[in-house]
Image (cartoon, rainbow, N blue to C red):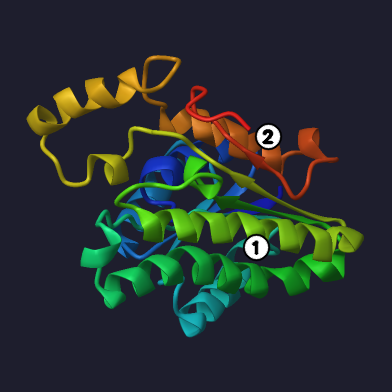
Amino acid sequence: MKTVLITGGASGIGLATARRLARTMRVVIVDRDGARANEAARALNAEGASAFAYAADVTKSDEVAAMMAQAARDAGPIHAIFCNAGVSIKQPVHKMSEADWDIMIKTHVKGVFLCAKAVLPQMCERRDGVIVSTGSDYSVCGKADGAAYAAAKTAIYSLTKSLALEFAPYGIRCNSVGPGPIETPMLLAGRTEEEWAPLRAARAERVPMGRLGRPEEVAAVVDFLISDRSSYITGQIIHPNGAQISW
């Protein structure tokens, strides 16, 4: 059984992906919230899957290295990684603090860099592996009141294309998934259901398909990109977005 490691795996798209991939793979769930990661792994194991959980901050190289080493001891070689950890801070540029800008760039871009760097040596040695990152529709278009998020997601896509070119000779494929509006805890952003209901309806009206996406629909795309069904696809971004953007 092959092993997939998922960062930001304790909720939202990461958790939905862990649940889907656990049907066919050993799953390593990584999250800053170690308690939620453990809870997710226990639930999967109770259903007969093989899952492990670790707490780690992907912006810190020592934590990433320690997590990777422990995962290798517990779960064996990492065949695929889904770099999904992310945060969202919505502010106009002139009001955004330098600290908020830094955490956005560090979590998204540095996090993918550190995780890819940590897993690539074993993939290169095997001459096989898959890296999938979470981009966004905003990887290819701007976002008002979200410049830091859009800049980080654009950088992830550029990093993904560069990794694809650099490691294609080693049989390693690198792609990005670019979700549109997906109903996750990040999108709700701490709102109550009463506050969110009218915003959900208004947001759905801007999507040609007329609704928000589900985390499970993004997980299906990640599953495809990790599987052999996409064996000739690398350096790409695929957008499960209800036609919010098309390019």
Secondary structure type for disc 2: helix
Q: Could you tell me which residue is drawn at 71 percent across and 44 percent down?
A: 236
Q: Which of the marked residues, 2 or 1, is nearer the chain's N terminus? A: 1
Question: Mark 2, mark 1: which one is toward the viewer?
Answer: 1
Q: In this orientation, which residue lies closer to the viewer: 99 or 41?
A: 99
Q: Could you tell me which residue is drawn at 44 percent across and 74 percent down?
A: 59
Which residue corresponds to mark 1?
159
Q: Amino acid at mark 1?
A: Leu
Which residue corresponds to mark 2?
224
Quarter holding residue 23: top right
The quadrant of the picture occupied by the C terminus is top right
Residue 167 in picture, x, y percent from top left = 82, 63
Residue 156 in picture, x, y percent from top left = 57, 59
How far apart are the two marked residues, 2 and 1, measured between alpha carbons? 20 Å
Q: Amino acid at mark 2?
A: Phe
Residue 131 in picture, x, y percent from top left = 67, 55
Secondary structure type for disc 1: helix
